[in-house]
Image (cartoon, rainbow, N blue to C red):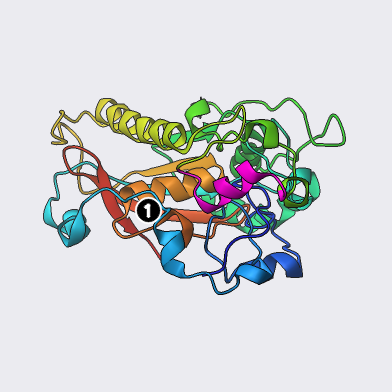
């Protein structure tokens, strides 16, 4: 495994992992799963031979579950089950410039939304039991386009504009990207000589961007969202605390839509799907990852759908 050289937008990550049209340089990074720190990565020439095991040691451990959890969805037809449709927001200017974009409230490039049209047509034909969205502008714009087809009208060069909310949608700040603090808006070239940045690239769980968010805090708020999701569904679907259905066809699995950021999507998958390391997933802007999940009494467990 190569050590990452170019963390593009860590989690709004790439245009690297972010841009729909990734440059050849970003494509080259595809072979490198390391730290994406949620971003697009490029190999550092002198570190090309870096052992993959070194990277794996820096990855947060996945909750225990094992093969037993892989069979969860098949064994209990009365458990609370959902299909989670996780969609990454559209491309922003900073994504294209390969800058770190976390909590900076930047809008999408309206021209790029056309690439989401096929997904929008499919999603608009579905019935959503619940709709969740990051409260940042780029996600709100993406959600509105996906469900209504509305064009994004930009009020300034970087896409900032007011967005009419979708009725019934929950706009949740827990679904924000990792906060990069003083590194927001910076590129790899801007930061590559910074010793703390180099240490963060090698082990993001142990180091925190100045003024930014720790890995522990990021993972904790995503876990908090997942726990809250279970509580919401128990109320909505009239289930008790053990997930037993009351007055509802438990065989009909509800669809939930979540429009958020690349790092959030990877963290949700890593927290719910056994043997799915955070760095193993590559989610481009406007792409959808579907998870079939069941509540096992303490947490969500399930599988990635094809």
Q: Position of residue 306 (x, y in %)?
A: 41, 66
Quadrant of res 53: bottom left
Q: Is residue 63 left or right of residue 143?
A: left
Q: Residue furthest right?
A: 157
Q: Residue at x 56, y 38 (%)?
A: 177
Is residue 259 at all visible to an observer of this figure? yes
Image vertical order of residue 255 relative to residue 225, above or below? below
Q: Verify whether residue 194 appears in magenta.
A: yes
Q: Is residue 87 left or right of residue 267?
A: right
Image vertical order of residue 195 relative to residue 102, above or below? below
Q: Position of residue 94 (x, y in %)?
A: 76, 44
171 and 147: which one is in front? 171
Q: Is residue 172 left or right of residue 240?
A: right
Q: Position of residue 16 (x, y in %)?
A: 67, 57
261 and 178: which one is in front? 178
What crowding class fits label 1: few (fewer than 14 Cα within 10 Å), some (14-19), or many (20 or more)?
Answer: many
What residue does disc 1 label? 291
Is residue 172 at all visible to an observer of this figure? no
Quadrant of res 46: bottom right
114 and 13: which one is in front? 13
Q: Is residue 197 left or right of residue 238?
A: right
Q: Verify whether residue 195 appears in magenta.
A: yes
Q: Residue furthest bottom?
A: 49
Q: Residue at x 70, y 36 (%)?
A: 184
- Where disc 1 sits, the SS reads strand
Bounds of the magenta segment: 192-205
């Amino acid at each position: 495994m190569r050590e990452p050289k170019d963390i593009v937008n860590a989690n709004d990550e790439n245009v690297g992992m972010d841009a729909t049209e990734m440059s050849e340089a970003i494509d080259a990074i595809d072979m490198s799963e390391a730290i994406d720190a949620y971003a697009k990565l490029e190999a550092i020439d002198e570190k090309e031979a870096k052992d993959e095991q070194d990277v794996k040691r820096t990855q947060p451990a996945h909750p225990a579950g094992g093969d037993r959890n892989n069979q969860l969805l098949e064994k209990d037809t009365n458990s609370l089950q959902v299909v989670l449709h996780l969609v990454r927001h559209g491309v922003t200017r900073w994504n294209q410039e390969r800058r770190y974009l976390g909590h900076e409230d930047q809008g999408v490039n309206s021209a790029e939304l056309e690439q989401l049209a096929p997904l929008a047509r499919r999603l608009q034909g579905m019935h959503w039991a619940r709709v969740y969205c990051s409260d940042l502008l780029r996600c709100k714009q993406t959600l509105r386009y996906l469900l209504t087809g509305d064009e994004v009208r930009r009020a300034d060069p970087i896409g900032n504009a007011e967005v009419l909310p979708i009725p019934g949608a929950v706009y949740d700040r827990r679904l924000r990207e990792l906060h990069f603090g003083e590194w927001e808006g910076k590129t790899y070239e801007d930061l590559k000589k910074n010793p703390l940045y180099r240490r963060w690239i090698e082990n993001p769980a142990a180091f925190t961007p100045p003024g930014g968010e720790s890995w522990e805090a990021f993972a904790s708020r995503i876990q908090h969202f997942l726990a809250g999701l279970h509580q919401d569904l128990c109320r909505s679907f009239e289930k008790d605390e053990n997930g037993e259905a009351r007055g509802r066809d438990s065989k009909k699995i509800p669809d939930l839509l979540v429009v958020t950021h690349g790092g959030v999507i990877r963290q949700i998958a890593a927290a719910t799907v056994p043997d799915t390391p955070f760095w193993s997933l590559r989610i481009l802007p406007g792409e959808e990852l579907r998870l079939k999940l069941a509540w096992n009494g303490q947490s969500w467990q399930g599988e990635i759908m094809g």
